Image (tube, rainbow, N blue to C red):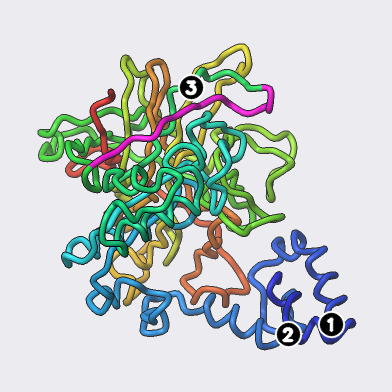
């Protein structure tokens, strides 16, 4: 929509520009009428733009349509130049998974040298100390922390690799910047937990370094989902214990009433959605929320699993994955995860603060392959893996690790109509009864990359 309003066609046609502005004014209303149809969308005034939207929307499977230079780096990794490179992203940006995978892909091919920078920001907001309603402290901005500013960081990189000696390095501390370690990441957490004058939670954090990604010494620890809403760490033997108690939790997923997105790894979403960290409570600021604005955990279609209060600090840094055993009475549906740092009640936050860290989703038809979607058989149990974007957080003593499981996170992610139809084509929907199966052999479990807290 924004690009359409800036197009040569709109700039040369006042009536067309006025029509697009009118549609943008009602964009929230349009998002309540999904899925759109060609000729009945806010982009109908510019068919070329509308065609492009529907072309991407309806190409759900991973085919040659997506294997294009400039879209899919993975498919062209072997052809990329063997040159130094820096991959930079942030925890509330849509691209930390892309950055880490590209870094690993280049390194696996012995190309580079490569390095990685991961901050706590939303997309492009490297000069801010906050994301959403959470403040990460004075160290959070790139400027003044890992470089005097972004230009100095880039200049130091070119000085390091294009000049023959340190004597030729530019002024402003460039030589020192250039010698920083291969991986620089911002570990969120460690703040006072109080509400700052800005109204944001003081979550705090600090920059840390490592020699590789995932971090050396990472312990991949599994936490089992249990019927009473507990999240308990598994001893290794549990994975092979067929006699472990089994249970299941079922819920109704109504595509007409999806779980609203409250922050997350989002960019370019205003005014429909905004990225960052927020208390997971419905709020008039977020699309799809409605009175009485209760916590998302109170919804019957959100399954909540929590650890006991932590007895000591615990750092989680790296990719996060959820292994679920699921079934549904529909041919297709979605399953979502959200990892949360749950603060205990305090004077500033009497109900605590459920801070979202990362999220993920899997459309069940793609459980085995992105290329060849397969429908579900009603009632059959499937083992699926949902991969969330990587994150880094210090869960403080007294906090809880919380996992939310559901089937929607809208408008961050497209809502599944549960009919099995191609994306963007359904005119009807089905209410699904989705089930998460717990216990037994290879239990449903959350796998976290745990780092020794220092």
Disc assigned to residue 175: none
In depth, the one of 7 and 220 nearer the eye is: 7
Q: Earlier in the sequence, mark 1 or mark 2?
A: 1
Report whether 96 appears left or right of 232.
right
Q: Position of residue 191 (x, y in %)?
A: 48, 22
Quick check: 270 above or below 76? above
**Residue at label 3?**
191
- Whether residue 407 is in magenta: the answer is no
Q: Give the Cα separation between the discs numbered 1 and 3.
A: 51 Å
Q: Are marks 2 and 3 in contact (CB under 8 Å)?
A: no
Looking at the rendered structure, the secondary structure element under dot 1 is helix
**Residue sitting at 52 percent across and 78 percent down?**
56
Q: Position of residue 300 (x, y in %)?
A: 54, 39
**Residue sitting at 74 percent across and 76 percent down?**
6
**Residue sitting at 32 percent across and 30 percent down?**
315
In the picture, the quarter occupied by the C terminus is top left
In depth, the one of 44 and 11 nearer the eye is: 11
Quick check: 124 above or below 58? above
Which contiguous range is marked in magenta? 197-210
Q: Nearer the viewer, mark 2 or mark 3?
A: 3
In the picture, the quarter occupied by the N terminus is bottom right
Q: Residues within 10 Å of mark 3 (few under 14, many from 20)?
A: some
Q: Residues within 10 Å of mark 1 (few under 14, many from 20)?
A: some
Q: Are marks 1 and 2 in contact (CB under 8 Å)?
A: yes
Q: Nearer the viewer, mark 1 or mark 3?
A: 3
**Residue sitting at 58 percent across and 66 percent down?**
429
**Residue at label 2?**
46
**Residue at label 1?**
16
Looking at the rendered structure, the secondary structure element under dot 2 is loop
Report whether 272 appears left or right of 278.
right
């Amino acid at each position: 929509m924004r690009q359409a309003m800036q197009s040569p066609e709109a700039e040369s046609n006042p009536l067309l520009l006025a029509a697009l502005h009118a549609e943008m004014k009602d964009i929230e209303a349009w998002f309540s009428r999904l899925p759109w149809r060609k000729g009945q969308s806010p982009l109908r005034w510019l068919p070329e733009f509308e065609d492009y939207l529907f072309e991407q929307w309806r190409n759900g499977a991973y085919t040659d349509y997506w294997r294009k230079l400039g879209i899919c780096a993975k498919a062209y990794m072997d052809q990329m130049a063997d040159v130094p490179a820096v991959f930079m992203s942030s925890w509330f940006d849509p691209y930390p998974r892309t950055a880490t995978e590209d870094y690993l892909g280049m390194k696996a091919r012995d190309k580079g040298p490569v390095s990685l920078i991961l901050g706590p920001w939303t997309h492009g907001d490297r000069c801010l100390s906050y994301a959403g309603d959470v403040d990460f402290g004075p160290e959070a901005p790139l400027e003044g922390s890992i470089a005097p500013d972004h230009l100095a960081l880039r200049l130091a990189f070119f000085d390091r690799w294009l000049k023959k000696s340190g004597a030729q390095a530019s002024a402003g501390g460039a030589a020192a910047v250039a010698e920083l370690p291969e991986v620089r990441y911002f570990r969120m957490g460690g703040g006072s937990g109080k509400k700052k004058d800005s109204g944001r939670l003081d979550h705090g954090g600090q920059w840390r370094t490592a020699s590789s990604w995932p971090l050396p010494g990472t312990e991949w620890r599994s936490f089992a989902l249990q019927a009473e809403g507990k999240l308990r760490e598994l001893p290794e033997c549990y994975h092979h214990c067929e006699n472990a108690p089994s249970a299941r939790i079922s819920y109704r997923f109504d595509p007409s009433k999806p779980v609203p997105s409250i922050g997350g790894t989002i960019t370019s979403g205003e005014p429909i959605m905004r990225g960052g960290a927020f208390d997971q409570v419905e709020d008039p600021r977020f699309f799809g929320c409605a009175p009485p604005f209760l916590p998302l955990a109170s919804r019957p279609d959100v399954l909540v699993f929590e650890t006991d209060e932590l007895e000591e600090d615990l750092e989680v840094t790296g990719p996060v994955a959820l292994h679920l055993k699921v079934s549904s009475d529909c041919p297709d549906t979605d399953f979502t995860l959200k990892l949360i740092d749950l603060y205990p009640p305090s004077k500033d936050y009497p109900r605590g603060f459920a801070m979202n860290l990362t999220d993920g989703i899997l459309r069940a038809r793609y459980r085995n392959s992105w290329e060849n979607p397969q429908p579900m058989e009603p009632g059959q149990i499937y083992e699926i893996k949902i991969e969330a974007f990587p994150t880094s957080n210090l869960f403080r003593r007294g906090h809880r690790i919380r996992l939310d499981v559901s089937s929607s996170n809208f408008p961050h992610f497209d809502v599944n109509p549960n009919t099995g139809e191609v994306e963007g084509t359904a005119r009807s929907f089905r209410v699904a009864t989705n089930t998460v199966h717990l216990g037994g052999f290879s239990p449903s479990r959350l796998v976290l990359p745990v780092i020794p807290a220092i």
